[in-house]
Amino acid sequence: MNRLELAEKIAQEHDLSRAQAERILKTVTDTIVGVVKKGGTVGIVGFGTFKQTSRGARKGRNPATGEAVKIPARKVPKFLAGAGFKDAVDPKAAARRRAK
């Protein structure tokens, strides 16, 4: 499913025009990106958490030449799936967790 298909689904489920649903979806995604970009965390209970993490500098290799290269440190977005999302994807795993 792509962004347009998701907006169409939102429009159908909530009796909105596709344009309204697209604006809502854009607001949600822009807000998540803005908060994570500033170093904040966005948590949606039962769905997951969006946050920023740091990846340290490291050494790598150019696959074409085999030459060693330095890969600089950088910030990367991270999504951690919540328990409800994980359980929906794999109900058997949820049952195993509950049995422990």
Image: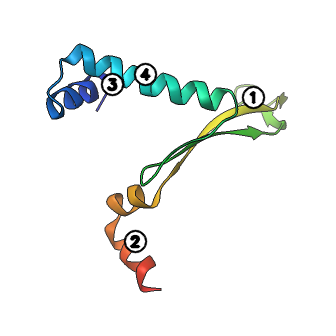
Q: Residue at x 40, y 20 (%)?
A: 26
Q: Residue at x 51, y 26 (%)?
A: 31
N-terminal-most mark, 2 or 3 = 3
Based on the displayed image, in which of its 4 quarters is residue 34 positioned?
Answer: top right
Badge nearest the viewer, 3 or 4: 4
Residue placed under numbered mark 1 in the picture: 62
Residue type, label 1: Asn
Q: With respect to residue 88, does 26 lie above or below?
A: above
Q: Residue 68: percent from the left, percent from the top?
A: 85, 31
In 3D space, how far apart are the residues under numbered discs 2 and 4 (Cα atoms)? 34 Å
Q: Residue at x 18, y 23 (%)?
A: 16
Which SS class for mark 2?
helix
Residue placed under numbered mark 4 in the picture: 27
Q: With respect to residue 16, does 56 lie above or below?
A: below
Count every numbered label the image shows and give the total. 4
Residue type, label 2: Ala
Residue placed under numbered mark 3 in the picture: 3
Which SS class for mark 1?
loop
Residue type, label 4: Thr
Q: Residue 21: percent from the left, percent from the top?
A: 27, 22
Which SS class for mark 3?
helix
Task: Look at the image and tell me whether residue 78 can be seen.
Answer: yes
In 3D space, how far apart are the residues under numbered discs 3 and 4 (Cα atoms)? 13 Å
Badge nearest the viewer, 1 or 3: 3
In 3D space, how far apart are the residues under numbered discs 2 and 3 (Cα atoms)? 29 Å
N-terminal-most mark, 2 or 1 = 1
Looking at this view, is 58 or 76 the one in front?
A: 76
Left or right of 89, for residue 50: right
Based on the displayed image, in which of its 4 quarters is residue 2 positioned?
Answer: top left
N-terminal-most mark, 1 or 3 = 3
Residue placed under numbered mark 2 in the picture: 93
